[in-house]
Amino acid sequence: MLHRSEPLGEAHAAVSDRWGGVSTGPHAELNLADHVGDDPQHVAENRGRLASVLGLAPGSVAFMTQVHGCEVAVVDGPPTPGRPLPQADALVTRAQGVALAVLVADCVPVLLAGPSPAGPVVAAAHAGRRGVALGVVAATVETMAVLGARPDRVSALVGPAVCAQCYEVPAAMAQEFLASVPSARATSRTGTPALDLPAAVTAQLHTAGVGDVAVDPTCTAQDPSLYSHRRDAVTGRFAGVVWTAG
Ligand SMILES: [Zn+2]
């Protein structure tokens, strides 16, 4: 059920794995995404189980419609059933009683928390190749700052993602990407051009002023307990979740 779960600054962060749910076939078992062809009732059951294990109220977890962009949505409370999800790649809140979730299967889940004069500010960002190039990490930290969190007091967890050795890309794509994100330079296991997204995200966090950065070393493509789009194509999504405990 849980890949990890721990305090993050004055908040709490957790990352799910693929076990302990009711999904079957390529989505087995704890798929949390409703856009990957899984049975919606299974996804709903899985989301309920995760909330329960994390000690969160049913329906208190906010998801977003992720589009590989750099839009950041500010959330002011638990999601309203039936209302469309924000189309964004990062969620930020200062509200209590709501947890923020990012869904991934190789992209980098980034969970952040920092104090503000009005209470903790938390954020969850989806940083894939395009989001990293577009600056979703910096945009997220900027929005946290707007809500009163000083970047130098923000703590970040860079969650499990595809590692550089497993993330071979065409040479032209690498060249174009590295022109704007040189910190992603890497070589694959077979010596071909590759991108190191966790390293790029870490560098972008530091550039944004975040000093306290923990990086999960697990590679999604190599760990069968996590979903990997690169490994399995049709698959589920696990989640990074962050909330203000209290
Ligand atoms: Zn790997």
Image (tube, grey):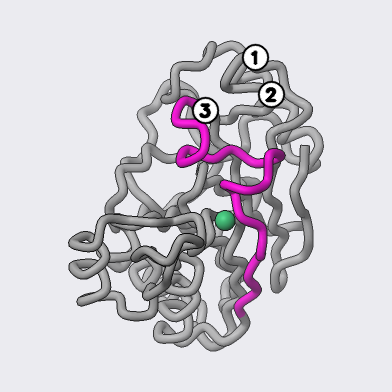
Can residue 154 be spotted in the picture? yes
Residue 113 placement (x, y as % from top left): 60, 69
Q: Which residue is mark 1?
A: 24
- Read off the residue under disc 2: 29
Q: Is residue 123 visible?
A: no
Name the residue at 50% across, 76% down. Answer: 202
10 Å crowding of disc 2: few (<14), some (14-19), many (20+): many
From the viewer's side, name the closer residue of 118 and 131: 131
Q: Residues within 10 Å of mark 1 (few under 14, many from 20)?
A: some
- Reading the chain from its start, which is encountered first: label 1 or label 3? 1
> Where on the image, by quarter, is ligand 1?
bottom right
Alpha carbon separation for disc pair 1 and 3: 10 Å
Instruction: Identify the image quadrant of residue 23.
Output: top right
Q: Which residues are drawn in magenta? A: 213-234
Image coordinates for residue 41, horizontal then vertical, percent: 59, 11
Amino acid type, label 1: Thr
Residue 153 forms part of the magenta stretch: no
The residue at label 3 has a CB less than 8 Å from ligand 1: no
Secondary structure found at label 3: loop
Looking at the image, do the residues carrying marks 1 and 2 touch, with CB atoms under 8 Å apart? Answer: yes
Q: Residue at x 46, y 60 (%)?
A: 190
Task: Give the percent coordinates (x, y) of residue 212.
Answer: 62, 82
**Label 1 SS:** loop
**Circle 3 residue:** 235
- Tell whether 28 sits left or right of 174: right
Q: Is residue 61 left or right of residue 194?
A: right
Q: What residue is drawn where x is 38% and y is 69%? A: 143
The answer to which of marks 2 and 3 sits earlier in the sequence is 2
Looking at the image, residue 73 lies above or below residue 29: below
